[in-house]
């Protein structure tokens, strides 16, 4: 029996990069959380402690900040693609780079009805995300872009049921003809290529986000699964540049409170919002002619990547 | 030496009460986190384990949910005042009740430009708060209302300096003529009485919030302390119904990154947003003719109340 | 009407100071979270933006780290007292200083049954705390020390009941003759003076912690209130150097699960551990001859300090 | 172009199951966080909203609690295997089940030197984990067990260096001959089969944990990668029942504080423990003759599973 190194990855996680554009008096802000990592032949570092092929995580951090100026942040996707390409240049032992970016949105503070030039309030709500994976094979390079959003909390106060489900001896759930449906949505969509319409990642992001919201709102839901599928279908129909979309959606239970012991009726008006446990629904919606995902969703082989965290 | 019971308080914390108004097809939602507690003569419960004067925390929970229907939630303040009065009725051993409410805002999902009737997205950002304290003295009752907001994250990308400060042998900080100023604001204002203009707590809330934002934006800041004082003064000038306002404001440091080792200039464009440590600025702005706070800010004697958590 | 500055406080929060003692090959580690703040006449800073009396929070940070070497960390209390005295020297406008320290415990990693010289595992569990308040009045100084612990999670699987409580129309809770009692304890005790036996704060800490645990374990509980009172009494009886002790104790509900729909009995064996809402019990136990607390529990006037979080 | 459902999974996450064994006066406690999920042909639920093949997540919750009594919790692994097998029986549309369990350890409270019968303190520190995946193919079933721990925070105050690394134009990091090495370890190991020595999962768990600690302590570290590889090798050498082990290890940076501006030396004694960014090292150590992992690490196709959260 011989012990060997398996898949591995290393990098600097959660660099909080804030980029202010101040070319004019009307400033712009990009507020990012950037994680970079490299894969490749790093056996010597693991087995012998030889670091000669290892570009330090501290250097990766420096680069993430420097690129916010040198390359700029026109979009998370564009910035991440540039960083990934750079790291493959800089670290010859690396066969792949993975750049993950979260972006926090800010609004201009309204002063007498007009957005202020350099004062901002953080918007809160959902967070824009992207993960860029870039690999080399000889002289060629390939890149995959998976963008998305997380923490989009949505709720329908009617137009949702859950009936006709499978029952066994442990089933006590009554059927619900009218319930609250709520989730904190994570959505991630894989682009078919790095060529998006007009090179404009943000227009697609905004379009997808709006479709997700509208479809959630207007779909009569017979289960959260059905809502997600409808949402994914609508995205794919409107955005041919997207090959597939994946959802992770906790069912944020709102339990109708029994007020009858107090002689009070409760026709769908008072609910307890519960924390744990919660339903967790995960689904993929794709095209039958989508290009293969290959390494788009590939991440490190570590435990975190397996979703067991 | 005799051992005695000192101040004490008990209740049910963090009831997540969601109230849907569905009297018409156009639903409304109030999403609350409600904590109730009672003070008074509960010596027997502590010393002898005698619960005969103790209204259970489970009952307090039930009441918080029932009142969302029976009394309704026109505003957090109005709902909390009703709950406090009820608990003094229900528990004769209680000399005081304290009701704390947080409210999470939701927006209607926009569908083809119009807000949907029954689909909502949680707004994120800052949270509205209120704390109502009600006490009895014989046949009379007195109430204090402290309302506010928290988690209002604001940032100015210029218009802020920090210079001329005291120096000692441990001082290494250079003066800053132009820096990012950012905080996650907690503000709480004490109402002079429970009579607010038009009985409309929400109009005052909206007005204060807007003044805080505008004043932060438009004040050239020589320190976060100065910004807070200006913000508080503006609130008191515009709202005679408010006696004082208190702030707790972490200075969310954004450090300018030194890119010179890479031959890159950084004239206020790339910053590292730091987590810990952070400056913490706390200040009160009040009127010299304000009514005494008395028990408005009084809370339980427990450790949490002392701010040492 | 004139607007004036009320109570205020500023400082640097959450300095993560790690001190390694390496005078011999057998290292020692003190792992601290240090928050410092100053009170006093800082009107100019707030009203005019004049910082000439303000010792920067950055300097406070530097000092917290330098003192870990210059003064050392024999105990959190001793270190905090030294820092507080220094800040009153350094900032003449300050009339009071408040130093809060949390300490995280580490154990030596056991290697073949013996504790390693310089390898440690963080213990987890409860955190040791202290808050030192020091004030000057003319040439004299006074100090108060409030020490404690937090996050001490304890549970009894029997020996707890809750019966005989007050009922009203909103009461549905059945009486419980045998239930799980669990809490995540915060305890803080005020020392009668800064003179503790042998000058050894740690011996008292260890003693109090053990008394809390043993008394929780051995007290038949008719309510969490009763357990807390017994725990506090036992501490005061054994430690005359302690004037009072305050508790904040969430009742971490463990609900017996009804397995009868599945034909399964559940005689106190399977429970659901709930998150929210939770009972919150807060109580003080004191001596009737204790010195007055004066400013021991005084903290900044900001919202956080008022327990309204 | 046709839109189709891709991989999907659903279940109930974070059931907080507490099991008390009270067959004698000396109680035992198992404190679990259980997440269950099913995979299979659930197209009708997604596309048509037809729930007839869907065993509700509420039923999964009920079953998790009922099995804590009916099957018992001799170990997380044994309990999870039983649940997985049951769900494949109960839901004929499911082709696979995945059960994830975290276990929180409790110690008996020591009373006069002896562990109490029914009073416990939560240990804190690291958490034991397991993930069981079970699939059916016709009449046969296959199961994989991946067990581990997380949040094991360890630190070496010497015996660690980082030198000889690759440099590029963004590298500013100085070489370190003696530094603090610290991490919050996540380790997960895949069992070669469900047959473990003596059927005793806990003995293996305890053994692996001790090897990880000892090897971390005694390995002179030229990088965190090297420490992890040594730790994984030692586990595989001692435990032939384990096929591979995967690590995710944030490098918890402790920065030596420059005290020279204050005329104070700092020879490795005072450090700032930083939050973000952090290095993140992920590695797999395996045997060259290990059975293929197949679906052991397979999880839902959702975004969370891809590690991009």
Image (spheres, coloured by chain):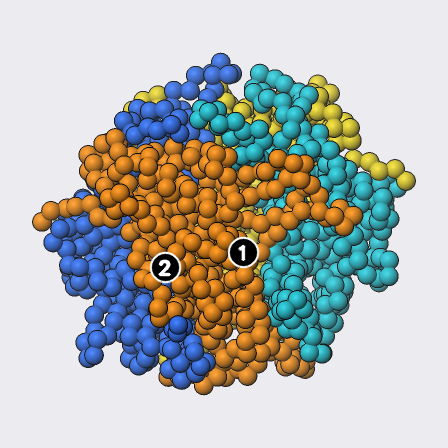
Chain colours: A cyan, B orange, C blue, D yellow
Q: Identify the residue under disc 1.
A: B203
Q: Is residue B232 left or right of residue C206?
A: right
Q: Quadrant of residue A62?
A: bottom right
Can marks 2 and 1 be said to lie on one chain?
A: no
Q: Residue at x 65, y 25 (%)?
A: A177
**x, y percent for residue B5:** 20, 45
Q: Is residue D309 above or below residue C51?
A: above
Residue farthest to the top, as pictured: C263
Question: Would residue B149 be visible to someone looking at this image?
Answer: yes
Q: Disc 2 designates what residue?
A: C305
Residue B188's image quarter? bottom left
- Residue B308, given in percent of the width and then of the height, sits at 34, 58
Instruction: Looking at the picture, tell me which residue is in the foreground, A32 or C121.
Output: A32
Quadrant of res A216: top right
Quick one: quadrant of the C terminus of chain A? top right
In the rendered structure, the residue with mark 2 lies on which chain? C
* Residue drawn at 41 percent across, 45 percent down: B81
Q: Residue at x 45, y 31 (%)?
A: C272
Inter-mark Cα distance, 2 to 1? 27 Å
Residue closest to the eye, B160 or B118:
B118
């Amino acid at each position: 029996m011989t012990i060997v190194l398996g898949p591995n990855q290393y990098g600097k996680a959660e660099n909080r990069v804030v980029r202010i554009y101040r070319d004019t008096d009307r400033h712009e802000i990009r507020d990012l959380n950037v994680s970079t990592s490299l894969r490749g032949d790093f056996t010597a570092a693991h087995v012998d402690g030889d670091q000669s092929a290892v570009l330090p995580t501290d250097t990766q951090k420096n680069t993430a900040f420097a690129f916010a100026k040198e390359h700029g942040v026109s979009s998370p996707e564009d910035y991440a693609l540039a960083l990934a390409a750079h790291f493959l240049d800089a670290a010859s032992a690396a066969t792949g780079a993975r750049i993950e970016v979260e972006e926090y949105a800010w609004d201009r503070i309204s002063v007498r009805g007009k957005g202020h030039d350099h004062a901002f309030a953080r918007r809160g709500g959902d967070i824009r995300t992207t993960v860029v994976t870039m690999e080399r094979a000889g002289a060629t390079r390939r890149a995959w872009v998976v963008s998305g959003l997380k923490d989009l909390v949505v709720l329908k106060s009617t137009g949702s049921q859950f009936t006709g489900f499978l029952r066994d001896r442990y089933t006590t759930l009554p059927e619900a003809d009218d319930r609250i449906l709520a989730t904190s949505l994570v959505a991630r969509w894989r682009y078919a290529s790095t060529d998006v319409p007009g090179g404009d990642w943000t227009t697609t992001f905004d379009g997808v986000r709006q479709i997700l919201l509208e479809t959630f709102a207007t779909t009569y839901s017979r289960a959260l699964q059905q809502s997600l599928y409808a949402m994914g279908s609508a995205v794919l129909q409107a955005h041919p540049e997207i090959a597939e979309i994946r959802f992770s959606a906790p069912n944020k239970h709102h339990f109708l409170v029994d007020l009858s012991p107090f002689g009070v009726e409760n026709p769908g008006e008072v609910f307890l919002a519960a924390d744990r446990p919660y339903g967790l629904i995960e689904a993929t919606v794709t095209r039958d002619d989508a290009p293969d995902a290959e390494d788009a969703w590939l991440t490190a082989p570590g435990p975190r990547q397996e979703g067991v965290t």
